Amino acid sequence: MRTKDIIDMLAGIEPGSALDAIRARRLQARENAQKSYLSLFEPIDASDFSLAERAAVAAFVTGLHGESPVAAFYREKLAASADGAALVEPIRSEIARGKTSGPYGAFPAGPLSVEDKAGLIYRVSAERKSELGARLVAALEHAHLLVFRPRDAASADMKTLLAAGWSTTGIVTFSQLVAFLSFQVRVVSGLRTLAAASA
Amino acid sequence: MSTVNPPVVFTQDELGWVSWIDPLPEAELTERHFAGLVDRARAKSEYFRLLVRDPEVLEARTKTDKDIFYNVADGLPRAERELAAAATSRYNGCIYCASVHARFASTYSKRRDDVQRLLDEGVGADLGERWNAVVKASVALAETPIAFGPDNIAELRRAGLDDAEIVDVINGASFFNWANRLMLSLGEPSK
């Protein structure tokens, strides 16, 4: 059985609709956006990044983009995942703490410095740290940076993740997950906007 | 380790990219990894040998990328897909991604000076109605929370884009919100 195409589902694209036909013209992109989702959320090997951690980071990242069908989907995924239900409330409160507007951050020092934009440097609240654990605390703080101020990223951030127990391979998959969701949430939003403008 | 010489301005010059964490050594790549790389020649790239630590995700990401940008049987001209990628990268602040896709935008549009103005002046540069609409839509999509709305659709339509071409803008700009975050956070560009 094939899993339903997740972007179509989240964007409300019905078979036979105009947008269904347009997406069919980029079949390889459509199928591989789906394969990206599956390889991130139904991986063959989750030893470097557990399924509950993936769902927690996904709920956090999509929640930071504001309430949407995508945010609801990943929040439900977290609630349904083994060891995930207990994380729903801490993730909800961290989303509320982390909400801001991006992109912001600093450029390399030089002529572009006039475009530097200051903003929230998010840290997990002290009282949530024990229930989230060191790995997720580091992951949420880095995910917030990736969502809102990716140009602030520095090599020291990699050391922080490694020190919190992330493997190099785990960091790669975690970064792909946050970056993929940044893509998916925008495609869904864009397609929904286009569908509404064509109705 | 080689010395990193990071660029401090946006440029159309060719840049290198240096990873902050360990890529897989070429000698350790298996057939599973080569499937993830899609093009075997990518084994020479530090960036792809890092991402190939998760080969299934890399393979799917690469094939998504190629179809969004290289499938030009119909839809938006390649130059304007590259413009969406360059504008997104300029706005998010990815000097490396912007360099690659600004070069492609110049090559396919033959409007190198306009592309350079996007890099020099930023996403507010006046590049004419059609390019302005593509840049503005890309910027709106790059914002968090996402600011893309009916006004962007109306503007793209006024500039002559049909719905299939608008989907190409949405795909291209959205994809660079994926690419920028990897390039910016796992390593850095070097001149």
Image (spheres, rainbow, N blue to C red):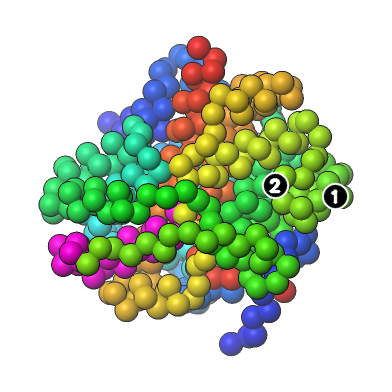
Image height of A183 relative to B183, above or below: above
Badge 2 amino acid: Val
Q: Chain of mark 1?
A: B
Q: Is residue A155 left or right of residue A171?
A: right
Residues drawn in magenta: A127-147
The residue that disc 1 covers is B112
- Write down the quadrant of residue B125 in the picture: top right
Q: Nearer the viewer, mark 2 or mark 1?
A: 2
Single out the residue that lies furthest toward the top: A199
How far apart are the alpha carbons under marks 2 and 1?
Answer: 15 Å
- Write down the quadrant of residue B109 in the picture: top right
Q: Position of residue A57 (x, y in %)?
A: 31, 54
Quadrant placement of the N terminus of chain A? top left
The residue that disc 2 covers is B123
Q: Position of residue A71 (x, y in %)?
A: 32, 39
The residue shown at (79%, 40%) is: B126
Image height of A112 relative to A29, above or below: below
The residue shown at (54%, 15%) is: A198
Element type where label 2 sits in the image: loop
Mark 2 residue crowding within 10 angstroms, few (<14) / some (14–19) / many (20+): many
Q: Position of residue A79 (x, y in %)?
A: 17, 44
